[in-house]
Image (tube, rainbow, N blue to C red):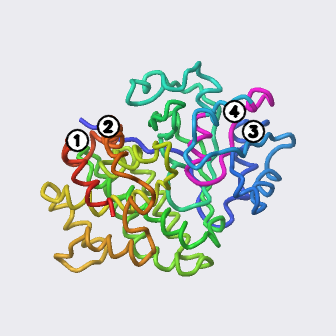
Amino acid sequence: MSLISYLTTIEFGAGTLATLPAHLATLGVERPLLVSDRGLFSTGLVDQVKALCPAGTAVFLEVPPNPTEEAVLAAVHIFAEAHCDGVVALGGGSPIDLAKGVALLASHEGPLERYAMILGGLEHITGNLAPVIAIPTTAGTGAEVGRAALLTLSDGRKLGFISPHLIPRRALCDPELTLGLPPGLTAATGLDALSHCIETFFSPRYNPPAEAIALDGAARIWRSIDRAVADGQDIDARTEMMMGSLQGGLTFQKGLGAVHSLSHALGGLKAVSLHHGTLNAILMPEVLAFNADVTAEKLARLTTVLGLPSGTDLPDALRTLNKRLGIPRGLRTLGVTDAMLDTVITGALADHSHQTNPKLLSADDYRTILAKTMI
């Protein structure tokens, strides 16, 4: 027996941002907290979105690249002080995940770690959450339709907070908001989205609808990512990338795998700041190669869907794609050292994505994969 459910209300297409006032009204949100970051503020987009919100909308911009417990608590303070009744999240995965954390702690008694999936938090998260409207500005995380928030606790643990109640009530996916995204960020976020489609497809959980969505999303990204990186104004490529990213988020129900258990653990390192999508791009070929002995049939299906010749070595094709798009060769080039690996492996073994890798990995297995990425 399998429980299969989908998911939330999505507005998709160029110009979708203009529907924000109507969705706020439908949800009964009169005093939202707008969560974004300083980078988007500098582009003028935050002011553009705030102008579509009710008068008196509060704003929180201090979102770290890997959102932290401290930032969540600071935003919750503003939420309470301004008597907010909803959250509008504008940006990539970091603002959207932080917004989910705000909605959670604004109505649930702390501490935050009580609600972490790996610590049994799922049963403690109720439907008593302020509504969240997510507006993605990258085509990467799928957080706008995802049930998880990745948050780094004060003690350095990067944990997943997972519940269907954390899925934003509305996702406004406007590919025009991604026009002009720099090539490096387009590549890293796009490969992040591809990793979601690929890992959920390989997850051993039974969910054929999610697998079909994952395959379609992977194909859209594979066909479009080179064009999107080469031309920041290609609206057709940007639309395909945003749909592929959305589809990756829609398949999170199946669970991810070792790419993400490792990237979550790496992202929790305090000594170095690492971009989640870049990590996934580097790790993905080596994890697929390690799992290949138990995923041969699915590897063949995925290769066909991507339009590659029969017999193509998909991990090697991914390495070639990374190189073509300018992704760093390995973790060492990002500042990861051998001394950090024990901490990373411990974190990966404890991560919620560890259990849904196609085969269960040991500490030595993780060490073998990491060794191939320490270039």
N-terminal of the pair, mark 3 or mark 1, is 3
N-terminal of the pair, mark 4 or mark 3, is 3
Residue located at (41% from left, 45% from top): 264
Would you name the residue on which mark 4 appears?
74
- The amino acid at mark 3 is Pro
Give the residues in magenta. Answer: 78-101
Q: Viewer-nearest of labels 3 and 1?
A: 1
Would you name the residue on which mark 1 appears?
363
Expressed as whole percent of the image width and height from the top left, the position of residue 290 reads: 19, 57
Q: Quadrant of residue 351?
A: top left
- The amino acid at mark 4 is Ala
Q: Residue furthest right?
A: 55
Q: Helix or strand or loop: what does disc 4 sit on? A: helix
Expressed as whole percent of the image width and height from the top left, the position of residue 18 reads: 73, 58
N-terminal of the pair, mark 2 or mark 3, is 3
Callout 3 environment at 10 Å: few (<14), some (14 to 19), or many (20+)? many
Residue located at (65% from left, 30% from top): 73
| Alpha carbon separation for disc pair 3 and 1 | 45 Å
